[in-house]
Amino acid sequence: MFKRVLGLVMVLALAVALLPSTSVVAQEGEVWCGTDEEVEITFIAGTVGGEHEVYQGLVDRFMADVCPNITVNLVERPESTTDTLAQYQQFFEGESNELDLFMVDVVWPAMIAEHLLDINDLMDADMLARFYPALIDAYTVEGRLVALPWFAGGGMLYYRTDLLEKYGLEAPATWDDLAVVAKTIQDGERAEGNENFWGFVFQGKAYEGLTCDALEWQVSSGGGRILSPEGVIEVNDEASIEIFDKVASWVGDFVPPEVVTYQEEESRAVWQAGNAAFMRNWAYAFTLAQAEDSVIRDLFGVSPLPGKEPGMTAATLGGWGLSVSKYSDNPEAAVALANWLTEYDALVEFHLARGEQPVLPALYEDEELQAALPYLAFTSDILTAATPRPGVAGEQYAVVSELYYTAVNEVLAGNVDAATAMADLELALADLGFEFP
Ligand code: GLC
C-alpha cells in the first residue's frame, strides 16, 4: 500500500515537472515563458557596431528553443543613448503599448521609473541573487526594480602593441605619457606616408558619451565627480580645469579636430582602420577589433585608463539593463525574455559575440570567457572601483549631463577656456538647486 502511494506521488511529481510552466512568478531553474498563450512582443535594442546581429541571434534561439509561443520583433534603437532616451520618452508620453521590452542605460532609471514595471512582482527574489547587488541597486528606484542588469561597462584604454614595439615605447601610465607616446607614433606613421594616422581618439561630441569620458578625465586627475553624492557641485576645481585644457590642447595636434563630433562608433572607425595609436572606448570594441577580418587583430592591448600620476585611473560606470513597459499588454512574456537573456548560458553566448562586461560575478570566473576577453582580469572589480555618474541628480540627470557635456564640448572645440566654462557650469548647476562647494 505504502509503495503504491509512493509510486503515485512520484508519477504526480513527474507530471507536474513536465507540465509547461504557467506560474506568474519565475522560479529558479525552470524554463519560464510567463504565459502559455501565443503572444507577440516588441523588443527595442541595438544598434552600436554589430549589436543588432548579436541580439537577433539570441532572440531567434529564444523563439526556436526556449519559448516557441512568444514571437519577438526586434527593433533597433538610435545609436546615441541621448537620442534613445528621447525616443522612449515619446512612447511613454503616449502610454504606447507598442513597446514591451527595451534596453535602458544604467543612468536612466530615476528619470523613467514611473513608466516601468516593477520586476520584483514577476520574479522570485532567489533569481535576482545571481546579479551583482550593486547593479540591482542601480536599477532600483524607491524599492522598485525597474530593469534586469544585462551588461556593464567602464572606459578603457586601447593601445597598439605593434606600434609601441616599433618605436620602442611603453604603454603610458599617465595622461602626459600618453601625449608624448601618441604624438611620437603619429609623427612616425605620418612620416612613413600615412597622412590619416592619429595619436588618440575618444568620444568628444556633445552627448552622453562625452559625460562619461570627461568624468574619467576629472576623476583620474584628482578632480571632482560633477556632483558629490550629497549634491555638492564638483566641476570648478584646479585639477579638472587643468585636464580639460590639456585635452583641448591635444585636439588638432594628435587628436583629430573632428573628435568634437565623435560618438563611440566614429572613434572606433579610425581605430579599427588601423589609423590610431590609442582609443578610449567600452569593451564592445574589443571583440570587433579581434574579428577575423580586422586589420588590427592581435595587434592591440587594453588596460585601465591613464591618470595624472601613475596608478591614478578612473572608469565611468556604464552599461544597460532590460526594462518592461508599464503599458505593455504582455509583461510576463517580456520578463521571460529578459530573464532568459540574463541567464548564465545566454550571457556566455552574448559576451563571446559582443565583448562588454558581465553583470554576473560567476561569469568573471568562466574560463572560456577569460580566454576570449583578457580585459576581464582587470575589470572584475568594475562595480566597486568604477565611478558612477551622479545619481544624486535623480530626475534632473539628463539636464545636468547636457549642461556638463555641452560645456566640455565647447572647451574641446576651443571656443572657451576651461576655467570660464567650469565657472559658468557651476552657476548653471547651482540654478538647478545643487550646492556650491
Ligand atoms: C555606453 C554605456 C552607457 C553610456 C553610453 C554613452 O553605451 O554603456 O552607460 O551612457 O555608452 O555613450
Image (tube, grey):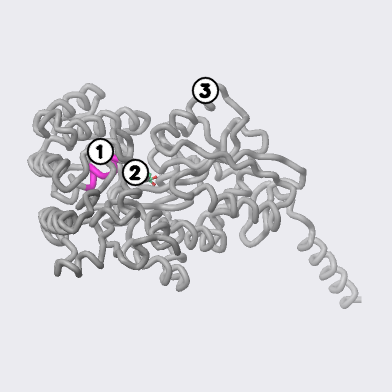
- Residue 363 seen by the camera: yes
Residue 215 drawn in magenta:
yes
Residue type indicated by callout 2: Glu
Residue drawn at (62%, 33%), measured in percent from left and top?
328
Residue type indicated by callout 3: Glu
Which residue carries the number 3 mark?
A: 93
Looking at the image, which is closer to me, 34 or 379?
379
Label 2: state its secondary structure. helix
- In the rendered structure, which disc, 2 or 1, sits on the residue that comes first in sequence? 1
- Image depth: mark 3 or mark 2 in front: 2
Respond yes or no on whether mark 3 lies under 8 Å from ligand 1. Answer: no
Instruction: Give the Cα separation between the discs numbered 2 and 1.
Output: 9 Å
Looking at the image, which is closer to me, 141 or 189?
189
Pointers 1 and 3 in contact (C-beta within 8 Å):
no
Residue span colored magenta: 210-216
- In the rendered structure, which disc, 1 or 3, sits on the residue that comes first in sequence? 3
- In the rendered structure, which disc, 3 or 2, sits on the residue that comes first in sequence? 3
Q: Give the percent coordinates (x, y) of residue 192.
A: 18, 58
Label 3: state its secondary structure. helix
Which residue carries the number 2 mark?
A: 266
**What label does residue 258 carry, if any?**
1
Give the main secondary structure, helix, strand or loop, of the magenta stretch.
Answer: helix
